Image: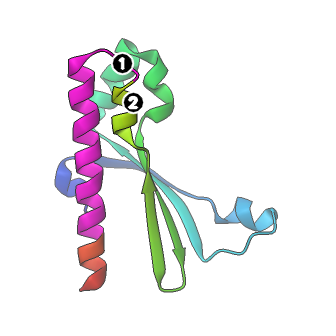
Amino acid sequence: TAIAQLGYTVTRVQKVDYGLEKLGFETDEYQVVFFGKTAEILRLPKQQPDLIPFLPLKIIVFAEGLDTLLLSDNYISLAKMYNDSALTQIFHTWRSDVQKIFINVKQSVQK
């Protein structure tokens, strides 16, 4: 819900628990949520193929008991790699939106 509220679409939720358990790790829940705006996901790789590993955007959810940790890429660090003001604006938007998603999730969990 927090992702959709910002105009993004969840493209896939990938559970990672099984692979971790096969490696001997014990975990309650570990998954990656892939999301993005369709137009960006289609357009950006054509303009900048080296952005393909970063698309769609992703948030890692690690839940253990009553604790949940959310992780995401720091898209501002991508801005330092490109001398393109339009891309820099997109990276700043992604960073801001991910922070909003984290805040919304935190608030919904605290209710």
> In the image shown, does 11 or 51 lie closer to the viewer?
51
**Residue 14 percent coordinates (x, y):** 54, 55
- Magenta span dominant secondary structure: helix
Q: Which mark identifies residue 45?
A: none
Q: Secondary structure at mark 1?
A: loop
The answer to if 95 sits in the magenta stretch is: yes
Vertical side of 12 occupied by 92: above or below:
above
**Residue 70 percent coordinates (x, y):** 43, 63
Q: Quadrant of residue 75?
A: top left
Residue 1 visible in rendering: no
The answer to if 59 sits in the magenta stretch is: no
Vertical side of 79 occupied by 62: above or below:
below
* Residue for point 47% across, 26% down: 52
Q: Residues within 10 Å of mark 2 (few under 14, many from 20)?
A: some
Q: Residue furthest front?
A: 80
Q: Are marks 2 and 1 in contact (CB under 8 Å)?
A: yes
* Residue for point 80% across, 64% down: 22
* Residue for point 52% across, 74% down: 63
Q: Secondary structure at mark 2?
A: helix
**Residue 27 percent coordinates (x, y):** 65, 74
The answer for how far apart the CA atoms under marks 2 and 1 are is 7 Å
- Image quadrant holding the N terminus, namely bottom left
52 sits to left or right of 84: right
- Image quadrant holding the C terminus, namely bottom left
> In the image shown, does 4 or 76 lie closer to the viewer?
76
**Region of the chain picked out in magenta, as a range:** 81-105
Q: Which residue is mark 2?
A: 78
Q: Which residue is mark 1?
A: 82
93 sits to left or right of 48: left
